[in-house]
Image (cartoon, grey):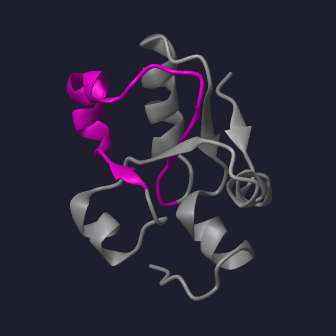
Amino acid sequence: MIPQIQPQELKLLLERGVPVLLLDVREPQEYAWCHLPGSLHIPLGELPSRVGELNVGEELVVVYCHHGIRSLSGAAILLQAGFPKVASLAGGIDRWSVQIDPSMPRY
C-alpha cells in the first residue's frame, strides 16, 4: 500500500519547516497552470528514467498530481527505487486548492 498524506498534514509540515521534497508528476501544461511553490516537476511518464535526478535521503518526498491517482504510481516508482519516505498527496493539487489555498487556479 502506498502511503498518503492529507493536504492539512502537508501544510503543517511545511509551516514547521520540516524538509519535504514536493514532486509534481503532472504534464507540463498542468504544471504551468498551477503548482505548489518550490516543487520539482518530472512528468510521470519520465519519472522511471529520471529518478536518478532525485537524491535518496531521509526527507519526505510528497508526490502530487491533479486528483491523486498518478501520484500513487509516482510514489510506487520511488518506493521501488529505494526512497525511504514517500507519500502521495491525497486528492492532489485539486484538494489542496479547495482545502488549503483557494487562490490557486483549479481546472
Asked if the magenta segment contains residue 56, the reply would be yes
Q: Is residue 1 above or below residue 93?
A: above
Q: Is residue 97 above or below residue 2?
A: below
Position of residue 4 in the picture relative to residue 69 (left or right): right
Q: Residue at x 59, y 16 (%)?
A: 84
Position of residue 70 in the picture relative to residue 5 (left or right): left
Task: State which region is magenta.
Answer: 39-66
Position of residue 103 in the picture relative to residue 13 (left or right): left
- Residue toward you, 72 or 34: 34
Quarter-wise, where is residue 3 in the image? top right
Position of residue 43 in the picture relative to residue 12 (left or right): left
Number of labels in the image equals 0
Query: Residue 18 in the image: x percent, y percent?
Result: 69, 45
Q: Is residue 19 above or below residue 59?
A: below
Asked if the magenta segment contains residue 69, the reply would be no
Query: Residue 82 in the image: x percent, y percent?
Result: 48, 11
Q: Residue at x 78, y 57 (%)?
A: 12
Q: Residue at x 64, y 27 (%)?
A: 2
Residue placed farthest to the bottom in the image? 103
The quadrant of the rendering that contains the N terminus is top right
Q: Residue at x 58, y 43 (%)?
A: 20
Query: Residue 59 in the image: x percent, y percent?
Result: 59, 30
Q: Is residue 46 above or below residue 24?
A: above
The quadrant of the rendering that contains the C terminus is bottom left
Quarter-wise, where is residue 86 in the image? top right
Query: Residue 105 in the image: x percent, y percent?
Result: 48, 84
